[in-house]
Amino acid sequence: ENVDPQKTAFLLRKAWTLYSVTPLYRFHRARLRDYARLLSAFIAAEKQKGLAVEVGVELDIKVAVSSLADLRGSEQDQAAVLVQLSSRSRASSTNSEDKLVWSGWFCSVYGDDLSENVPEDFTCLPLFLTHGAETYTSMVGSWFQKTFDCCFRRLAISPLNLSWMVAMWAGCKLDRAASAVELVFSVPHLSQPLDISYAIHPEDAKALWDTVQKTPGEITQEEVDVFIDSLYAHFHRHFKIHLSAAKLVKVSTPVASAHCDGIVKILHSQYLSGVLMLLTELAISQIQ
Amino acid sequence: HLATSLPLPSERDHLRPRIDLIVFMIDIKSKYSLKNVEASLAYVDASFFLGKVCFLVTGVGRVNACSIDTNAVCKLGEAYCSPVLFCELELEGIRVATAQRLLRMLQICAGHTPGVSALSFVSLMRNFDGD
């Protein structure tokens, strides 16, 4: 883990909306400043067309595109690309500060499955994470799609994948006191929607995972099943409810939380690489 | 005849007609349905596994709602020498086609198709890798 924590601090404790992105055609890292300019012009043009983002306030949007050299898994991965939209209100004085209104970043962490099979002119950055207003996401996405002939899709996370996440992340060793491990379920087929939240002390969750996992560093589907089934059995013993019949919609652990709509929050820089690796894998399987 | 689990209540045994085909339905969105099927399998007489059992996995159209590892279901099918069918009941075309397939299988299992018996399904299931 040789990523500078200063550089990645911006990632933590923010809710990122996930997308999968197909490879970018003729994306040149040397031209990032040009891209920022072009994207800025595109956004200004969209606003001229009447695509108002904030009513009543005149905003100039400044675009910055940068490369995050350390944010990658292997040497085969492309370094991450960060796009930031800041606003400066025209009405206020010239020495007012820029306010960050939207950020989005493309990354690939151990995305060899995809990059191995792709021709020369393509850049593989299959995972796209955004934070900020949907209208900006849409504009940035449109520009990238037009410029690099790529395709964005919202990345949904199935209950099966969420159960992998909670098993993996609950088992992570953390130095400081940690928040609870929580699983949130929605119960279908009822006249009134019902949500069930199941919170477990993080040390109990880790202890359970430690009894299940056979080889450190390796996780199998069977181990995840045993872990999850144990949690369900415990719940059933107390409440006589079969959580296995409900839909797992969100998992939270001290390391990260994830929602089935494709929204994640990374809470700890220590396991950043592992989290991004899993998300990269999900993005790639959605593309293929 | 529909049942939520096995064994069937013994009180009605004498009124029940002969069972020619058992279809175990697994909802891809519900791990509980898989566990229920696994538990019910224990109550099925071994003779049924000569072509008179099949697994029907429903809800496959909704990949993002998947709560079950489909590999596990395929392994279940292999373990019990029975076919695994995948379908999406919410789509009318697939629903109708699946119903027709099951009906065809039932006709064969009930002995209504001359020259073909339930045992044919077992030989079709056999894996020819390495032969």
Image: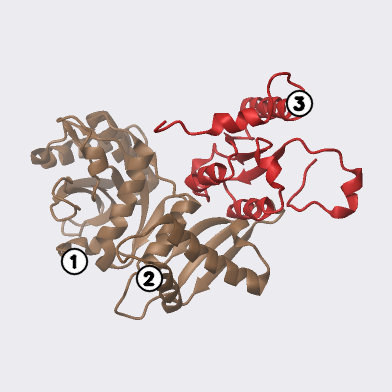
Chain of the residue on which disc 1 is drawn: A
Question: The disc labelled 2 sits on which kind of residue?
Answer: Pro
In the rendered image of the structure, the colour used to display chain A is: brown
Q: Amino acid under label 3?
A: Gly
The chain holding disc 3 is B
Quadrant the N terminus of chain A occupies: bottom left
Tell me the residue that label 1 is attached to: A5
Question: Could you say where residue A133 lies in the image, as x and y percent from the top left?
Answer: 37, 49
Q: Residue furthest left?
A: A30
Work out whether disc 1 and disc 2 sit on a shared chain: yes
The picture places residue B117, in percent across and down from the top left corner, at 69, 26
* Residue at mark 2: A254
**Marks 1 and 2: which is nearer the front?**
2
Q: Nearer the viewer, residue B72 or A198?
A: B72
B74 horizontally vs B43: left or right? left
Which residue is located at x 39 percent, y 57 percent? A220
Q: Position of residue A92 (x, y in %)?
A: 24, 56
> Residue drawn 54% across and 63% down?
A229
Chain painted in red in the figure: B
The type of residue carrying mark 1 is: Pro
Res. A136 in view = no
Q: Nearer the viewer, mark 1 or mark 3?
A: 3
The percent position of residue A161, horizontal first and vertical second, equals 44, 53
